[in-house]
Image: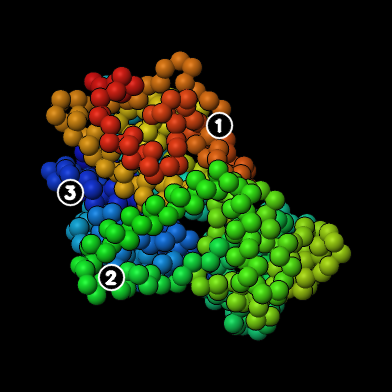
Amino acid sequence: MNNKYDVIIIGAGISGVGMACQLKRQHPNKSFLVLERRANIGGTWDLFRYPGIRSDSDMLTFGYKFRPWLGDTILAEGGDIKNYIADTVEDFKLTKNICFNTKVKAADWSSTENQWTITIQEEGSEQTNIIKCQYLVSAAGYYNHDQGHLPEFAGRDNFKGDLVHPQKWPQDLDYSNKKVVVIGSGATAITLIPAMAEDVEHITMLQRSPTYIFSVPGKDKVGIVLRKFLPDSWVYRLSRFRNIKLQSSIFRACRRFPDFMKRFFIGRVEKSLAGSTDIGNFTPSYAPWDQRLAAVPDDNLFNAIRSGKASVVTDHIETLTEKGIQLKSGQHLDADIIVSATGLKLQILGGMSVTIDGKAQSFSDKLAYKGVLIEGVPNFAYLFGYTNASWTLKIDMAADYVCRLLTEMDKHQHQVVTPVANDGEHQQDSILCSLTASYVKRDKAVFLRQGKSNNWHVHHSFEKDKKMYQQPLADPALKYQ
């Protein structure tokens, strides 16, 4: 490891690797380093190890634009996604650019030196080191990798079985022929239920309120046929374009015709369940896309319910008991294992502290410029994907934008670029204001704010963002030195 680089990227998950690939393609002469806290490639897909872990976005849009996903599975397993990221690293010969087991503690910008000083720490050690760079990119995601959200359940100490969180799944947990209760109704819960159903005595999804769930085909049958006649790269581009249009159309329809789309989603679920449970358990009180839609492949969740091995209960927890969960309705759920699929703890920038000339920076009162740069922070980018579509669609465009910005700086021999908002630009909504999920409400104060004008507003729209990123780089809001 050198002590100074042109660019440092934080995180070797799907965002950081995507950024590194585009940087190497567009700026082959720039020195760069990827700092990864974990011992392996993959980020999220290396961290989570619970049964059935998979994508909740289709891989044709979750894969990189510049490297086709060649599998037939639409919602891929976590291990396959991790391998895809690792193979991308190999293809682009990035291994030598990645420093593992390295936690970023702090970053300080010096206005006299026009560079970042990064304090890093080796995992498991108290020793710290210093490295420097001209441009810093955070690709560390938006949640705390150390722990998920685990509520303080009343009577928690009473329960004699295993209480686990999916983010810290014990690899030796034996759930065969056990009674399991999964608390939650999001993507993690609906993945766990069918994955565990065949081995348990019975598994129950306990939810406070229902989630919109829709089934997608397990395999891309159209793509399989097209690959018999067309090159893989062509099929990937065509299928990716199709799915982007389909996703955006569904999202727009949910916003414009919420009542119709609600009936549509619930009607499909009712047909899949075939009377095996009360449809009220799958009838949310909110409109579609007020929270993220949850996808399942080939009806697997509904098949598990129809088989009798899985069930859904909508209720509130009164207290944990020695043998399970006492609900406020009076019902008791027996359990040998309780899985608290209760969501994430949100944080930005991997939890590192950021200072400018020694002055601490609070990001909760700053705006995001084009959803990538941060108001008042020089030579810094924060890669943040979509919440209403595949994460990587936004990352592809954001990484390309950063690379083009670096080209612009080199062309005019600028050393520094800082986005500066006009007075009156600030709004109180966060960049996740469009979602009403509990984990967003719980930690919304940690996120960047929204602005009024186009370049300072985070649209969560692929079409709008594509047009925005194609605009010329010159903008009075960008102050160069």
Tell me how far mark 3 sits from mark 2, CA to CA.
29 Å
Tell me how far mark 2 sits from mark 1, CA to CA.
44 Å
Location of the C terminus by quadrant is: top left
Q: Which mark is residue 25?
A: 3
Residue 169 appears at what percent x and percent y? 55, 67
Type of amino acid at the residue the image marks with label 2:
Leu
Numbered disc 3: secondary structure: helix
- Work out whether 343 lies above or below 114: below
Q: Is residue 150 left or right of residue 410?
A: right
N-term-proximal mark, 3 vs 2: 3
Type of amino acid at the residue the image marks with label 3:
Arg
Type of amino acid at the residue the image marks with label 1:
Asp
Residue linked to disc 1 = 429
**Camera-side residue: 335 or 61?**
61
Q: Nearer the viewer, mark 2 or mark 1?
A: 2
Q: Residues within 10 Å of mark 1 (few under 14, many from 20)?
A: some
Numbered disc 1: secondary structure: strand
**Camera-side residue: 249 or 44?**
249
Q: Residue at left 37%, top 21%?
A: 420
Q: Residue furthest top?
A: 423
N-term-proximal mark, 3 vs 1: 3
- Work out whether 194 lies above or below 366: below
Q: Is residue 263 left or right of residue 28?
A: right
N-term-proximal mark, 2 vs 1: 2
Residue linked to disc 2 = 226
